[in-house]
Image (cartoon, rainbow, N blue to C red):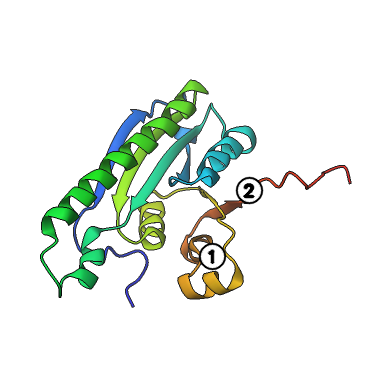
Amino acid sequence: MASPLENPTGTDTTDIILINDELPNKDDTRVVVIAIDQSDYSRHVVDWAIANFLRRESDLAVLINVCEISSELSLFAASYMNFSDVLTDFDDQNKLESHKLLHEFAAKLKAEKFACKAIAMQGDARDEIVRKVSELKADALILGCHGLGAIKRMLLGSMSDHCAHYCHCTVIIVKEHNESHNKNA
């Protein structure tokens, strides 16, 4: 099994979208990676990071989104017919959706006066996040918990568990707010 810090495809699958990375004091910068996807959990994660963790004066928030690579999907279809055009369209659509998502969340951070940049990647989300966090020498990773049940977690693996195990920085797993939870109870 390849190390989570290696890029098993050997190709650069990263698009960096520079939004606003100007910090008042670059010597004291804390790099905080926030992993997002198309789920509602991501909105909650970014809101939580803004309200509870990020510091305007010293943090660089790095948004990352990882899309799956269509070549992994093509392994199943390859024996039946040539899907190369469909897969290329799939990759292009994923890239557009990823960039749109990153721009949406980056605009929110920028409106709140946080320095940020956004990175779109392709591959296995667990491994790509661990690799990028290491590459950026991040001080913290913030990601959401999708609340998989025990069976699904066992079969599919939990991204947050994987990142907590392999990332060499603080990993903050933000759970979705439960309306029935009352802090005063």
x and y, in percent, of residue 21 in the image = 38, 29
Residue found at the very far front of the displayed protein: 80
The quadrant where residue 161 appears = bottom right
Residue 147, numbered circle: none
Callout 1 environment at 10 Å: few (<14), some (14 to 19), or many (20+)? Answer: some
Question: Please, what is the three-letter code of the amino acid marked with disc 1?
Answer: Asp
Q: Position of residue 44 (x, y in %)?
A: 58, 41
Is 77 situated left or right of 162 in this image?
left
Mark 1 = which residue? 161
Query: Which residue occupies the foreground of this view, 74 or 15?
Result: 74
Mark 2 lies on residue: 176
Q: Is residue 47 left or right of residue 123?
A: right
Image coordinates of residue 30 in percent, x first then y, are: 49, 39
Separation of residues labelled 1 and 2 (CA atoms): 16 Å
Residue situated furthest bottom in the rendering:
1
State whether residue 53 is above or below residue 82.
above
